[in-house]
Image (spheres, rainbow, N blue to C red):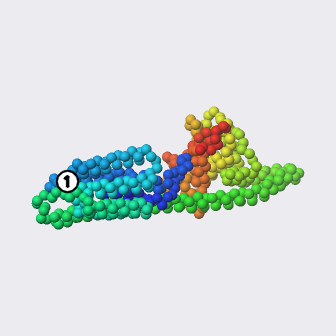
C-alpha cells in the first residue's frame, strides 16, 4: 500500500493547477499536444500501478514472516482476499490506462482512497490501532498532500482519520502465541522499528524522484519560456520588416519610374555605357521590389501581384535566374533531375527560403555553390551544397533554432530558422549535414501535394 503512494511521486509534482503546453523539429508536428497535467496524471497512474505491485509483494512477505516466522496466527483467507482486491484494482487501472487517453485527477483521487481502504482493511484484520504499521496512514497523507489538490488531500485525510478512529474500537484481535504473551511491548517496538525503516526508505525514494521530476519540469518550463521569448522576438522582427516593406514600396516605385524615364532619354540611349548602368540600377530596383513583395507575402499581405500558375521546371529556372541576376559574381552549378514536369502554384515563400539557403551557401563558399532538384515519389527534393568549412556540431544539433549562427555577429541565425519553419508549414522536412570531404549540404524535402494545382496549398 505504501508503494502505491510512491507511485504518485513521478507525477512531476503535477497537481492539477500546473498546466502548460509542450520543441519543434523540422518535421511537421501535431497542432496540439496534451497538457502537462494530463501527461502527469498518466505518469502518476503508471507509478501507482507499479508500486501497488510492490505493495502486494511486500504484504505477502510481511504476512509470511508474521505467520510462520513469529508464529502469530493471522486470518489468512481474509487478508489474502484484500491482496486479491488490490491485484484486481491494479489490473483494472492498467486496462483503463490503455483504453483512455485522458486520466483525470478524480481517477487518481479514487485510486488513492482505495489504497486507504485497503490499508484500513489489513489493519482491521491484524490488531487495528495497536498494529505498529498504523503509522502508514501518515505516508499516504504525505503523498496525497504532494500529489493532489488541497480539496482532494483533505478527503484523503478525512478518510484516514475515520479509519484510524474506527480501528481504535473495532478490529479483529490477534491470537498471540504464549512465547510473546509476556513480551508484547518488545514485539510492538520491533514492529515500529520495521515500520520506521519502511517509511524512511519510501520517503527517500519518493522525494528523490520528486526532485528529479521537479528538475525535469523546471527545465521544460524554461524551454517553453525561452521558446516564447524567441517567438515574440521573431514576431517583432516580422512586424518591423513588414512596416519597412510598406515604407520602401513607394520610393522603390518612384525610382523604377525615374529609371524608366532615363532609359528613354536620347542622351542615355545613345551612350552604351550609361545605358548599361541604368539597366543594372533597374535590375537592382526590381530585386529590391521582389524582396519587399516576398516580405509582405510571407507576412500574409500582398502588393497587388496575384499568385501565378507555373511548372516545377519553370519555377526552379526562375529562382536560379533571379538569384544569379542579383549575384553576378557567384558561381552556381544548377542541375534539374526532377523528371516529368508538373504544373504548380508559384509559392513566393518557397522562393525566398531557397534564396536564403543559397545566400548562406555562397557566404561559406564564394567560388562554388551547387543546386540540385530531384524527385522522390511524391516529394520535391532541393539540395544546396557548398565547399565551405561545413556546419559546427552545435549548429547541426540545433539546426533550425533561431540565433544559431556561425557568423559571430549579434542578431544573426534567423535565416535557417525561417527556412525550417516555412518548410514545416508546407508539410516538409529541412535537414543539414556536412559533406564527407569539405562543405555542407542542406536538403529541403517538400510534398508535391503542397504545391501542385488542385491540392491544398499548405499541408494541414
Q: Position of residue 276 (x, y in %)?
A: 79, 50
Q: At x 14% / y 55%, what residue is drawn?
A: 71
The extreme right residue here reads 266
Q: Is residue 158 visible?
A: yes
Q: Position of residue 405 (x, y in %)?
A: 56, 58
Q: Is residue 67 left or right of residue 41?
A: left
Q: Position of residue 204 (x, y in %)?
A: 32, 63
Give the SS element for disc 1. Answer: loop
Q: Is residue 143 visible?
A: no
Q: At x 29% / y 53%, what residue is drawn?
A: 55
Observer-nearest residue: 255 or 16?
16
Question: Quadrant of the image for the C terminus?
Answer: top right
Q: Position of residue 169 (x, y in %)?
A: 26, 62
Question: Quadrant of the image for the N terminus?
Answer: bottom left
Q: At x 19% / y 57%, what residue is drawn?
A: 174
- Residue wearing tag 1: 74
Q: Is residue 148 left or right of residue 235?
A: left
Q: At x 36% / y 56%, what residue is drawn?
A: 113
Q: Residues within 10 Å of mark 1 (few under 14, many from 20)?
A: many
Amino acid at each position: 500500500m505504501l508503494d502505491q503512494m510512491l507511485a504518485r511521486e513521478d507525477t512531476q509534482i503535477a497537481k492539477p493547477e500546473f498546466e502548460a503546453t509542450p520543441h519543434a523539429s523540422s518535421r511537421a508536428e501535431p497542432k496540439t499536444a496534451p497538457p502537462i497535467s494530463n501527461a502527469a496524471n498518466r505518469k502518476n497512474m503508471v507509478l501507482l500501478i507499479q508500486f501497488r505491485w510492490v505493495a502486494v509483494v511486500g504484504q505477502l512477505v510481511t504476512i509470511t514472516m508474521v505467520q510462520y516466522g513469529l508464529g502469530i496466527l493471522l486470518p489468512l483467507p481474509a487478508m489474502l482476499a484484500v491482496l486479491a482486491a488490490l491485484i484486481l484494482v491494479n489490473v483494472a487501472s492498467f486496462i483503463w490506462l490503455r483504453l483512455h487517453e485522458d486520466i483525470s485527477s478524480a481517477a487518481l483521487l479514487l485510486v488513492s482512497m482505495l489504497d486507504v481502504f485497503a490499508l484500513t482493511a489489513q489493519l482491521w484484520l491484524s490488531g487495528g490501532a495497536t498494529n505498529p504499521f498504523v503509522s502508514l496512514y501518515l505516508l499516504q497523507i504525505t503523498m496525497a498532500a504532494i500529489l493532489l489538490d488541497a480539496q482532494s488531500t483533505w478527503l484523503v485525510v478525512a478518510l484516514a482519520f475515520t479509519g484510524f478512529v474506527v480501528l481504535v474500537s473495532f478490529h479483529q484481535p490477534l491470537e498471540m502465541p504464549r512465547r510473546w504473551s509476556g513480551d508484547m511491548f518488545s514485539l510492538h517496538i520491533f514492529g515500529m522499528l520495521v515500520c520506521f525503516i519502511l517509511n524512511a526508505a519510501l520517503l527517500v525514494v519518493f522525494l528523490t524522484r520528486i526532485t528529479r521530476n521537479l528538475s525535469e519540469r523546471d527545465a521544460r518550463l524554461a524551454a517553453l519560456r525561452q521558446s516564447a521569448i524567441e517567438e515574440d522576438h521573431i514576431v517583432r522582427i516580422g512586424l518591423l520588416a513588414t512596416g519597412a516593406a510598406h515604407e520602401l514600396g513607394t520610393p522603390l516605385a518612384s525610382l523604377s519610374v525615374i529609371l524608366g524615364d532615363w532609359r528613354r532619354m536620347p542622351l542615355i540611349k545613345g551612350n552604351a555605357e550609361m545605358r548599361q548602368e541604368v539597366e543594372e540600377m533597374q535590375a537592382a530596383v526590381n530585386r529590391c521590389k521582389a524582396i519587399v513583395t516576398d516580405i509582405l507575402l510571407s507576412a500574409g499581405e500582398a502588393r497587388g501581384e496575384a499568385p501565378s500558375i507555373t511548372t516545377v521546371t519553370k519555377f526552379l529556372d526562375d529562382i536560379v535566374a533571379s538569384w544569379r541576376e542579383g549575384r553576378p559574381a557567384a558561381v552556381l552549378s544548377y542541375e534539374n533531375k526532377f523528371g516529368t514536369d508538373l504544373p504548380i502554384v508559384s509559392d513566393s515563400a518557397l522562393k525566398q527560403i531557397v534564396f536564403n539557403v543559397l545566400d548562406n551557401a555562397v557566404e561559406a563558399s564564394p567560388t562554388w555553390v551547387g543546386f540540385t532538384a530531384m524527385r522522390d515519389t511524391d516529394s520535391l527534393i532541393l539540395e544546396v551544397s557548398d565547399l565551405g568549412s561545413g556546419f559546427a556540431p552545435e549548429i547541426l544539433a540545433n539546426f533550425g533554432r533561431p540565433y544559431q549562427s556561425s557568423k559571430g555577429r549579434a542578431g544573426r541565425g534567423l535565416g535557417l530558422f525561417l527556412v525550417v519553419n516555412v518548410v514545416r508549414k508546407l508539410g516538409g522536412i529541412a535537414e543539414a549535414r556536412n559533406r564527407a570531404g569539405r562543405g555542407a549540404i542542406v536538403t529541403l524535402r517538400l510534398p508535391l501535394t503542397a504545391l501542385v494545382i488542385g491540392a491544398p496549398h499548405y499541408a494541414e
